[in-house]
Amino acid sequence: MGFLDDAVDKAKDFLGTDQGEQVSDNVLAGVADKANDLTGGKFEDQIAQGRQTADDAIGD
């Protein structure tokens, strides 16, 4: 395996932990908040749906 493959495997392992889940939730919440700020809340429902879809894909 190359360096990139090792890094991806380590990231996947980390995201499977409770701490990784907390970090990903915080990042997704921050991104969603920023997107809502930038759009003036106009697309809040779509952003929330996208956040949930991403969380489902990343989380356990």
Image (tube, helix red, strand yellow):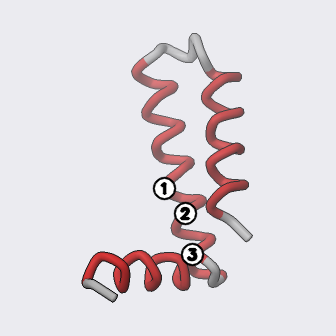
At 60% across and 70% down in the image, what residue appears? 22
Q: Residue at x 53, y 37 (%)?
A: 32
Q: Amino acid at mark 2?
A: Ser
Name the N-terminal-most of marks 3 and 1: 3
Q: CA distance from mark 3 to mark 1?
A: 12 Å
Mark 2: few/some/many CA within 10 Å (<14, 14-19, 20+): some
Nearer the observer: mark 3 or 2; the answer is 3
Task: Indicate which disc residue 27 carries.
Answer: 1
Would you say the residues marked 3 and 2 are in contact, meaning their CB atoms lie under 8 Å apart? yes
- Extreme residue toward the left, this view: 3
Q: Nearer the viewer, residue 33 or 7?
A: 7
| 31 w.r.t. 55: above or below | above
**In the picture shown, does residue 34 fall above or below 23?**
above
Other-residue count near label 3 (Cα within 10 Å), few / some / many at <14 / 14–19 / ≥20 = some
> Horizontally, is 9 left or right of 49 in the view?
left
Q: Is residue 10 left or right of residue 47?
A: left
Figure quadrant of the N terminus: bottom left
Residue type beneath disc 3: Leu
